[in-house]
Image (cartoon, rainbow, N blue to C red):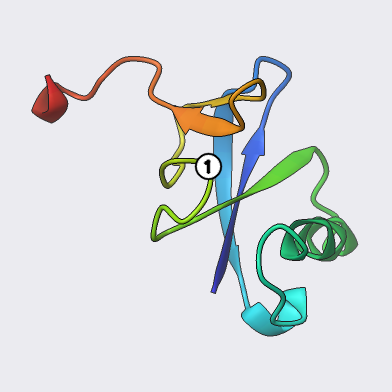
Amino acid sequence: MAHFVKVNNNNEVIEANVISNQDINNLPFPESEPVGQAFIASLGLDGQWLQTSYNNNFRVRYASVGMVYNPTLDEFEYKQLPEWMS
């Protein structure tokens, strides 16, 4: 499965979507990202969608709603550390 998150104009993660590896032609990241973005757009879902790794293989950590994408570092970050991490 391939995991994508939608980020708003403030780079906040506001939605998540999981698509089949077949829908990204079984490509590895980063080649899979534009294919997945095109597939998501074909479903009528607008906005900026970024691929995230469930296994933390890229972009440092798995993104979830409420996190922020840092384009300079190309990683997902917590807005505020979860209580269990502090």
Left or right of 83 in this view: 12: right
Q: Quadrant of residue 10?
A: top right
Residue 14's place in the image compared with 37, above or below, is: above
Left or right of 59 in this view: 11: right
Which residue shows up at 77% across the image and 63% down it?
Answer: 31
Which residue shows up at 21% across the image and 25% down it?
Answer: 82
Q: Which residue is mark 1?
A: 59
Q: Quadrant of residue 61?
A: top left
Q: Residues within 10 Å of mark 1 (few under 14, many from 20)?
A: some
Residue 9's place in the image compared with 85, above or below, is: above
Left or right of 52 in this view: 38: right
Pick whichever, 52 or 65, lies toward us: 52
Check the picture and name the quadrant holding the N terminus: bottom right
Residue 19's spot in the image, x, y percent? 63, 70
Residue 70's spot in the image, x, y percent? 59, 22
Residue 80's spot in the image, x, y percent? 32, 15
Residue 54's spot in the image, x, y percent? 42, 59
Which residue shows up at 50% across the image and 32% down it?
Answer: 76
Check the picture and name the quadrant holding the C terminus: top left
Q: Could you say whether the residue bearing mark 1 is in a helix, strand or loop?
A: loop
Pick whichever, 18 or 72, lies toward us: 72
Left or right of 28 in this view: 34: right
Q: Quadrant of residue 72?
A: top right
The amino acid sitting under disc 1 is: Arg
Looking at the image, how many numbered discs can be counted on the residues? 1
Pick whichever, 15 or 76, lies toward us: 76
